[in-house]
């Protein structure tokens, strides 16, 4: 006989090679329950800070507080950096002042900025107090840049060299320099006014002869970001041009920091998450939000949807006489609405994505629209036939089949058109298409669908 | 008076600092039309290969062929790597044999693998023929790994060192080695059997004294991937653990290649794109697909949706008598369906995302479900009041308001439950929740919504 528990754990392992498995979470919670600090520390030891953060996010809030208390001074700054902002405040509150200040002091200044930006003012102050004067200044400077800007994303530790240096000079400089950052991949060349002029990869440096000038072995992919550039644009450029790191400059073009690809990857991931959730009308909801936050977050979109649904109902109300005469129409109405809504969502999603990746532009908009209409027309004709058959077989009225079929063609073509036109129009007026397209598109398909179906029925069936 | 053309161009510039602007696309197309090769080359010169690929994707297919012919031998391999697979075949066909073989010969072997895997067999053969014997072997080896595996993603050029070496030995080795890869950021330490034992960043190497052992300055974040591991899991691990590069091993644990973060970032981006499109039922549709491909791609999901819509209609058909008696019910039905569908999509999207990021696990599933039900109940109560008022004011029947309110509460709670339970159940049986959740969830909300609304109406209003 096999042990079911073992099977579950094995299944977990193959599925989630990198995440916490169910069994270790259970063992950790058991250690917390028994107040066994030694066992807890042993169980947590193999976990990466990112995994510990995930663990803290997955367990309940009272378990979380007990675990933090028991884990005590083992808690380090990297875990704080990895935590979802929704529970950061809770965790910071649960840490003893001593543990908190130790954790924060060992963090890089850009990580402290990242931590502080989501905390309330009093907590920010408390953490700034424990930092040394120089670090505090760096953090306060970081916080002074706009939210979601290149300035917030960059690290201030930069390895640079004058552009006229040779490979040998750069190597000697680095070999004699004790305080190089832990992670760096390029040397940035600067002119006498500290303006970046190119960059050299460490690999290229290692494999070049000492007398070669740095300016002769710079990379083609060099790109510079302004400090107030939006981080979403930075992430897009990293992905588009396969950048590994890129310098950030201030308003005078002087080098002030560097952004590395791992930070850009995190931003890209967050942007995608935001897009997918905006399309569904849940803003930036996280699994860690409180019940009330969820309610507040979802309510506005449901309310907007109610408004558009009432609009659709008003259209139907115009046809009360028709509906009273033929109740079969009421039975079939949801099919029209549902097909239009789905077809609209399909073309809208492709359009929203193409706008985000900058593949849909004014250069090809007309071609895309035309293709969309033809494709919708083809699908519409096929479904018109299917619906026609359903109408005849189910209700025995050939003309009802004709009405259904015609309404289907009209609705799918309108869905295809609206699915592309609405996101493009929103983008043009500066509204995020992911945020608002869905509501507009389904309103159009509902209103047009009901109007076409009931209107045609009134003409052809009464 | 301002020149409207200038305004448009400026707007394009601020919005899309990195993409092609409309004006340069127009200028390039103009040069193509006039057959002006010199001007075309001058206009293309500042563009990154990724931008040229975007340009080829945005213009029509006959312009594309003319451009390629005119651009001639300026066309390089990097553009081929950047092209969307939907038009690669077209572009490869349009290149002259000489230009194609020059372009392919200058590509890295992993990029050639990436190019070949999407081409038809005869085109693959033609390209393999132009490669030198050693490169051809490397490419054929790459193609032998499973699709979407770590083996396909990795590059074979690896810089490694025996684990017992010192910093000085490693630096001397690299300084004397002519053939180092262009892009590398770490030295991988291997044991005598070529099994990876850790890695050292070049930055750390540069700042350490010559006599220090490499094994004393390895990074904590070391992770090894198996050659047949799925690339989606690799991308997840890079993002979760902030990896920059990671070794790939074969079945015997021997080092065979290395994956770098820029490749992982591309995969992460593709995975997100796939998820967002699967949620909308458009599979991997691209803006470049032909009209027929779009029709074929969208049809199955619309057909599934038709099936579930008919199911909802069958539910309504059970209440024909009720509908005949009170036609107002038919007018209000879409509101119930629409609210349920939207609420279901909201909680489903949060759940699908949380499953993808491995934040929703069996450890917290019950807590998430409970929270979801409470939140839906709260929203349901608020909307019940609003709907009750609409029912009374619009139709003057207080009991209709009660029916609407109750149906709304039931439908929103069921939507919240189904939105979380359906994706979790699909994940458990091994189906991608992004692919199939939507259909199931809206079926549940439609059926339950209509049943509750019309059923309650039958009991309370007749």
Image (cartoon, coloured by chain):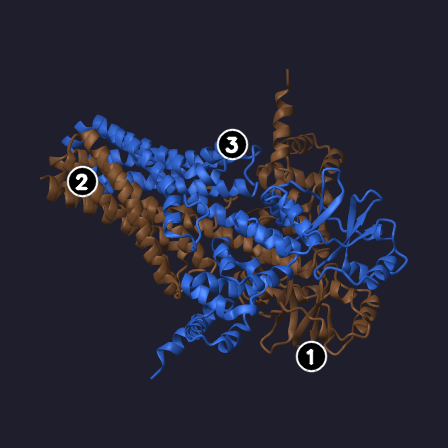
Chain colours: A blue, B brown
Which image quadrant for residue A147?
top right
The local secondary structure at tag 3 comes to helix
Q: Is residue B311 visible?
A: no
Residue drawn at point x = 71 percent, y = 53 percent: A134
The local secondary structure at tag 2 comes to helix
Residue identifier under label 3? A366
Residue identifier under label 1? B191
Q: In 3D space, how far apart are the residues under numbered discs 1 and 3 (Cα atoms)?
A: 60 Å
The local secondary structure at tag 1 comes to loop
Q: In 3D space, how far apart are the residues under numbered discs 1 and 2 (Cα atoms)?
A: 75 Å
Residue identifier under label 2? B402
Q: Which label sits in the foreground, 2 or 3?
A: 2
Which residue reaches farthest right?
A211
Chain containing mark 1: B
Viewer-closest of A147 and B422: A147
Q: Is residue A172 visible?
A: yes
Q: Which label sits in the foreground, 1 or 3?
A: 1
Chain containing mark 2: B
């Amino acid at each position: 006989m096999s042990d079911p528990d073992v099977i579950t754990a094995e299944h977990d392992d193959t599925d989630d090679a990198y995440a916490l498995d169910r069994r270790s979470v259970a063992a950790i919670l058991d250690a917390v329950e028994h107040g066994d600090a030694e066992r807890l520390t042993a169980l947590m030891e193999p976990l990466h800070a990112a995994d510990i953060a995930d663990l803290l996010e997955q367990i309940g809030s009272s378990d979380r507080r007990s675990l933090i208390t028991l884990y005590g001074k083992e808690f380090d700054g990297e875990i704080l950096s990895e935590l979802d902002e929704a529970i950061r405040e809770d965790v910071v509150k649960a840490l003893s002042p001593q543990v908190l200040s130790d954790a924060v002091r060992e963090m890089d200044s850009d990580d402290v900025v990242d931590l502080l930006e989501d905390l309330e003012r009093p907590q920010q102050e408390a953490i700034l107090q424990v930092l040394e004067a120089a670090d505090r200044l760096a953090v306060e400077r970081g916080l002074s840049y706009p939210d979601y800007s290149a300035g917030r994303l960059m690290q201030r530790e930069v390895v640079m060299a004058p552009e006229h240096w040779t490979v040998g000079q750069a190597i000697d400089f680095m070999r004699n320099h004790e305080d190089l950052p832990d992670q760096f991949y390029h040397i940035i060349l600067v002119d006498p006014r500290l303006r970046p002029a190119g960059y050299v990869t460490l690999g290229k440096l290692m494999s070049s002869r000492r007398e070669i000038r740095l300016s002769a072995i710079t990379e083609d992919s060099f790109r510079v970001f302004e400090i107030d550039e939006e981080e979403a644009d930075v992430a897009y450029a990293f992905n588009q041009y396969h950048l590994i790191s890129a310098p950030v400059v201030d308003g005078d073009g002087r080098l002030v920091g560097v952004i590395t690809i791992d930070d850009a990857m995190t931003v890209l991931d967050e942007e995608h998450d935001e897009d997918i959730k905006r399309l569904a009308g849940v803003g930036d909801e996280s699994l860690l939000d409180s019940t009330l936050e969820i309610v507040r977050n979802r309510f506005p979109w449901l309310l907007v949807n109610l408004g558009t649904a009432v609009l659709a109902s008003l259209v139907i109300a115009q046809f009360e006489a028709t509906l009273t005469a033929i109740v079969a129409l009421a039975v079939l109405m949801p099919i029209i609405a549902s097909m239009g809504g789905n077809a609209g969502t399909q073309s809208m999603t492709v359009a929203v994505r193409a706008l985000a990746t900058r593949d849909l532009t004014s250069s090809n908009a007309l071609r895309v629209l035309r293709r969309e209409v033809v494709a919708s027309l083809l699908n519409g004709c096929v479904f018109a036939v299917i619906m026609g058959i359903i109408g005849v077989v189910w209700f025995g009225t050939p003309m009802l089949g004709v009405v259904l079929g015609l309404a289907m063609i009209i609705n799918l073509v309108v869905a295809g058109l609206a699915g592309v036109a609405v996101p493009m129009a929103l983008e043009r007026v500066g509204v995020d298409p992911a945020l608002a397209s869905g509501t507009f598109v389904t309103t159009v398909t509902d209103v047009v669908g009901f109007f076409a179906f009931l209107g045609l029925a009134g003409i052809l069936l009464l």
